[in-house]
Image (tube, rainbow, N blue to C red):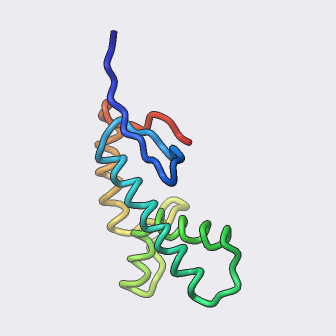
């Protein structure tokens, strides 16, 4: 019998995602925290947004935080490479992610 450890991200009693590593689960949970904060900020901004629109925008901002940081730092869009927008930070993180992808122990197990 094999023993397998899984790390489950749970929000408001609902399973969001299951990971094989604590590091990935923590990163996903942190991204969801950021999205929740962005949602609150957008709802308080006075813009005419429905909550679902604010949540979608907030999730995009949280998922693309490196691009948002690049824009805030430079007031420019990151350089377009191969049809994708990429900044130096994203390129660096992509190489880190490639190392993680090559490790069979570290992978997402189930998407909610």
Coordinates of residue 64 in the picture (x, y in percent): 47, 66
**In the image, 39: left or right of 94?**
right
Picture layout, residue 98 above or below residue 72: above
Report how many numbered discs are placed on residues in the image: 0
In depth, the one of 93 and 59 nearer the eye is 59
In depth, the one of 61 and 96 nearer the eye is 61
Q: Quadrant of residue 73?
A: bottom left
**In the image, 35: left or right of 105?**
right
At horizontal 55% and vertical 61% (from top left) the residue drawn is 83
Picture layout, residue 101 above or below residue 29: above
**In the image, 48: left or right of 12?**
right
At horizontal 52% and vertical 62% (from top left) the residue drawn is 84
Coordinates of residue 5 in the picture (x, y in percent): 32, 29
- Looking at the image, the residue that sits furthest to the front is 13
Coordinates of residue 55 in the picture (x, y in percent): 60, 68
At horizontal 34% and vertical 24% (from top left) the residue drawn is 4
Looking at the figure, which quarter contains the C terminus? top right
Coordinates of residue 41 in the picture (x, y in percent): 51, 81
- Looking at the image, the residue that sits furthest to the bottom is 46
At horizontal 44% and vertical 71% (from top left) the residue drawn is 67
**In the image, 56: left or right of 81?**
right
Picture layout, residue 20 above or below residue 11: above
């Amino acid at each position: 019998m094999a023993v397998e450890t899984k790390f489950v991200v749970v929000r408001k009693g609902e399973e969001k995602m299951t990971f094989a590593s604590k590091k990935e689960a923590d990163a996903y949970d942190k991204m969801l925290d950021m999205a929740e904060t962005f949602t609150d900020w957008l709802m308080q901004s006075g813009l005419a947004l429905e909550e679902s629109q604010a949540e979608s925008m907030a999730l995009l901002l949280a998922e693309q935080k490196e691009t948002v940081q690049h824009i805030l730092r430079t007031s420019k869009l990151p350089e377009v490479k191969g049809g994708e927008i990429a900044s130096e930070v994203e390129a660096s993180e992509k190489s880190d992610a490639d190392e993680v992808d090559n490790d069979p122990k570290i992978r997402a197990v189930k998407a909610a």
